[in-house]
Image (cartoon, rainbow, N blue to C red):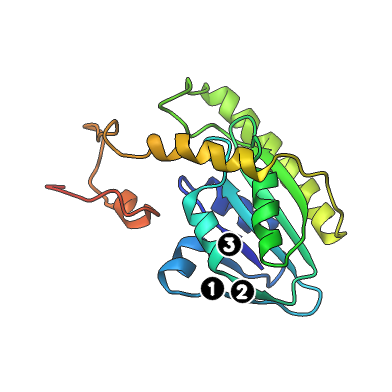
Amino acid sequence: MIYYFTGTGNSLYVAQKLAGPGEQIRSIIDSLENNEHHVDLADGEALGFVFPVYFYTVSDPVLDFVRKMTVSGASYVYAVIVCGASIGPAGGFLRDELRKKGLTLSRVDPLVVPDGAVLFYNIDSPEQMHRQLLDADEKIGTIRSAIEERKPSSITGSAAAGKALLASYHACMGTGKFHALDRCIGCGLCSTICPAHAIEMKDG
């Protein structure tokens, strides 16, 4: 079972690539909105989390779900954290939150993809992004093999550091700096899939 949170689609893509034959992937946003917090795993089934790092910490939807969920049958828990460069202390923060639920986080893998923090960093060239995506595909295969073999990994970062970074994350939330360009075709896809319901269509 894989639970994913995605803003731009990167983490959904990773979850789909990681899933084994017949393995379920579930949206964290959908689970929260439908009050589906119980995770019932088959014997020996792994529990995975795939999500992007925000400000080097764990985003509110992921924290909210982890704090509300109940789990039965989890013998191996892992996380793949999507990032533009580094996940900071997010792995350790998640480990400590899961520990409060009686769960042991066995493995954390950072996965570098084109950076989505467009307000803070220069956008990579198409060639750089293409190279990053090829490298990510290769690493996803390596991660999937490690998960299938139930391999652990070292997990760094502290809950205290993760919590401290939440303040920066919350301070920079908002949509004021974003706007549509004339290239918008009015398809409405952005408003349909936005996990925060922060986009609405007006006059096409």
Residue 161 placement, left or right of 140: left
**Kind of residue indicated by mark 1:** His
Q: Which residue is mark 3?
A: 66
Residue 179: give x, y in percent of width and height. 25, 34
Q: Residue at x 52, y 21 (%)?
A: 125
Write down the quadrant of residue 47 in the picture. Answer: bottom right
Do we see residue 132 in this rendering? yes
Q: Nearer the viewer, residue 138 or 98?
A: 98
Q: Quadrant of the N terminus?
A: bottom right
Q: Residue at x 83, y 47 (%)?
A: 153
Spatial CA distance of label 3 from label 1 is 9 Å
Query: From what the image shows, is residue 192 above or below residue 110?
Result: below
Q: How packed is label 1: few (under 14 Cα within 10 Å), some, or many (20 or more)? A: some
Q: Which numbered disc, 2 or 1, marks the residue that appears first in the sequence?
A: 1
The image's mark for residue 70 is 2
Query: From what the image shows, is residue 167 above or below residue 24?
Result: above
Question: Quick one: SS at disc 3?
Answer: helix
Q: Which residue is mark 1?
A: 37
Q: How packed is label 3: few (under 14 Cα within 10 Å), some, or many (20 or more)? A: some
Q: Residue at x 55, y 38 (%)?
A: 164
Query: From what the image shows, is residue 81 above or below residue 75?
Result: above
Spatial CA distance of label 2 from label 1 is 6 Å
Do the numbered discs 2 and 1 sit on residues whose CB atoms are within 8 Å? Answer: yes
